Image: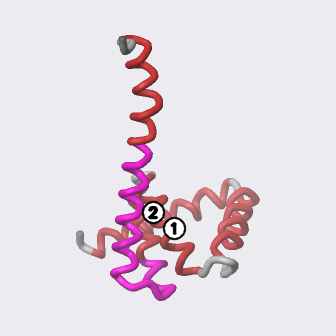
């Protein structure tokens, strides 16, 4: 993908947040304070937090957040290999999510509809 497209989408998001702030300033300022605190260096590094956020953005299929958190992770010192590994972990975790539903919910219905004899 052309990085200009990703940049335009992230910029459009930021402009949209600006418009929303004009209508709901307290809520948007509260959101920014909350996220600022969450991404501040703490027990986890800022880089680690951006890699976690990237995994969540991928799982949520949120294109703008994916672009944003890749850039933020890189700016916090993540290597391309760390970004790729975080993406792979997100893929593994999301497929684990499907597996857990397969062995619980799907199996429950199958056992009800077709009990083992």
Mark 2 lies on a secondary structure that is helix
Circles 2 and 1: CB distance less than 8 Å?
yes
The quarter of the picture where the N terminus appears is bottom left
Q: Residue at x 47, y 31 (%)?
A: 104
Which quarter of the image is occupied by the C terminus?
top left
Q: CA distance from mark 2 to mark 1?
A: 5 Å
Identify the secondary structure beneath mark 1: helix
Q: Quadrant of residue 74?
A: bottom left
Callout 2 environment at 10 Å: few (<14), some (14 to 19), or many (20+)? Answer: many
Residue farthest bottom in this picture: 77
Give the image location of residue 2, x and y in percent.
24, 73
Q: Residue at x 42, y 19 (%)?
A: 109
Tell which of 16 and 103 is nearer to you.
Answer: 103
Comparing 30 with 14, the one in front is 30
Colour scheme in the image? secondary structure
Location of residue 33 in the rendering, given as x and y in whole percent from the top left corner: 72, 69
Which residue is rendered at x = 46% and y = 66% of the image? 54
The magenta segment? 71-98
Is 55 magenta? The answer is no
Q: Residue at x 30, y 69 (%)?
A: 5
Q: Give residue 111's position: percent from left, percent from top.
A: 41, 17
Relative horizontal placement of residue 49, taking residue 55 as reference (left or right): right
Q: Main secondary structure of the magenta part?
A: helix
- Residue 92 lies within the magenta run: yes
Residue at the spot of label 2: 55
Looking at the image, how many numbered discs can be counted on the residues?
A: 2
Q: Which residue is mark 1?
A: 52
């Amino acid at each position: 993908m052309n990085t200009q497209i990703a940049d335009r989408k992230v910029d459009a998001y930021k402009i949209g947040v600006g418009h929303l702030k004009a209508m709901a300033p307290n809520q948007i300022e509260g959101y920014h304070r909350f996220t600022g605190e969450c991404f501040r260096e703490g027990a986890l590094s800022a880089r680690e937090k951006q890699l976690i956020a990237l995994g969540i953005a991928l799982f949520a299929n949120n294109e703008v957040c994916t672009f944003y958190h890749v850039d933020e992770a890189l700016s916090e010192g993540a290597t391309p290999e760390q970004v790729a590994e975080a993406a792979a972990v997100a893929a593994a975790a999301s497929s684990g999510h499907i597996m857990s539903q397969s062995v619980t919910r799907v199996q429950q219905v199958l056992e009800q509809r077709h009990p083992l004899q």
